[in-house]
Amino acid sequence: MKFPITNFNKGSQKYGYPLHIALKNHEFSLVMKMLMPKYVVNIHARDEEGCNVMHYLMGHFGYNSDRATKIANAFLKKGIEVNLLNKAELSPLHIAIKCF
C-alpha cells in the first residue's frame, strides 16, 4: 500500500470501517492486503447495525467465492466471532442464506 501510516481502525459506525467499506465494494484484494501482519486492523469492529466484517463478507460472498473463502479463512485464523448477532438478530450465516 502506498500509505502505510493509514489507520485502518478509524471509521464511523454509520458508514463502517475501511474493512467494511472494502468488502461492500468487492475490493477483496485490498482486504487481503489489510489483513497482512504488518498492518493492525480490528476485525471485530461493528457498524451501527451491529454487523462485523463477517456479516459483510457473507453478504457479498457470491461475488467471488474463491477470494471470499480465503478471506473467511483469514478472519477465522484471527478469531472473528462467527455467531455474533447484529441488531436484527442475524448472524453471518443468516446473511449468507438470505443472499442466496
Image (spheres, rainbow, N blue to C red):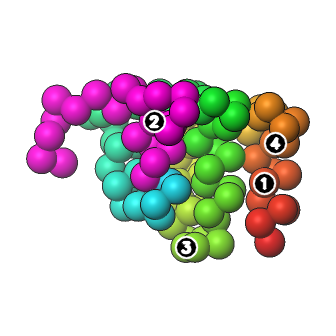
Left or right side of 53 for 3: left
> Are the residues tagged 1 and 4 within 8 Å (C-beta)?
yes
Residue holding disc 4: 91
Instruction: Tell me which label, 1 or 2, sits earlier in the chain.
Output: 2
Residue numbers of the magenta segment: 1-22
Q: Position of residue 41 (x, y in %)?
A: 40, 31
The secondary element bearing badge 2 is classed as loop
Using the image, determine if residue 36 lies above or below residue 84.
Answer: below
> Are the residues tagged 2 and 3 within 8 Å (C-beta)?
no
Instruction: Tell me which label, 1 or 3, sits earlier in the chain.
Output: 3
80 or 19: nearer the viewer: 19
Check residue 17 in the rendering and tell me which mark sits there, or answer none: 2
Spatial CA distance of label 3 from label 4 is: 21 Å
Q: Position of residue 42 (x, y in %)?
A: 47, 27
Residue holding disc 1: 95
> To which quarter of the image does residue 52 belong?
top right
Residue drawn at (34%, 55%), measured in percent from left and top?
30
Which residue type carries mark 3?
Asn
Which residue type carries mark 2?
Tyr
Spatial CA distance of label 1 from label 3 is: 16 Å
